[in-house]
Image: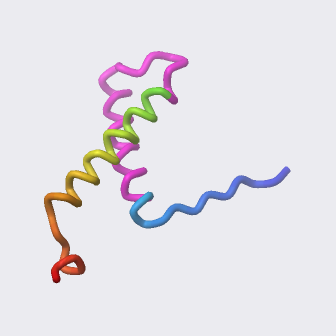
Amino acid sequence: MAKAFLSLQPSEMTVARSAANIYAAYIAAGRVPEGKEQDWMRRAIGEAFTIARLTDEAIHSDDEMG
């Protein structure tokens, strides 16, 4: 049986970690009904991406200064 392999870029890993935190908060709050886990994971990923995008628009890192 072949093992699954996953390799994320640093920016993808950052969004994945944020999404995991958001998803965990949904679970802790009792908002994730059985059978709807993937829907809530997708929602958390979308929210994490939005937060990352808004952060990128609002803050310029040293590498982005011209």
Q: Is residue 57 left or right of residue 8?
A: left
Give the main secondary structure of the magenta stretch: helix
In magenta stretch: residue 65: no
- Image quadrant in which you'd find residue 58: bottom left
Q: Residue at x 30, y 23 (%)?
A: 29
Instruction: Name the one closer to the observer, 20 or 11.
Output: 11
Across and down, in percent, residue 20 comes to 40, 43
Could you tell me which residue is drawn at 24 percent across and 80 percent down?
A: 63
Q: Quadrant of the C terminus?
A: bottom left
State the scheme by which the image is colored: rainbow
Q: Is residue 44 above or below residue 40?
A: below
Task: Please report the bounds of the magenta region as a residue range.
Answer: 13-38
x and y percentages locating residue 31 in the rendered image = 35, 20
Left or right side of 53 for 2: right
Identify the residue at image location x=41%, y=21%: 32
Instruction: Give the vertical position of 61 relative to 22 (above or below).
Output: below
Find residue 40 and report its horizontal and vertical position in percent: 43, 28
Q: Tell me if residue 24 is in the magenta stretch.
A: yes
Q: Quadrant of residue 28?
A: top left
Question: 27 or 48, which is in the foreground?
Answer: 48
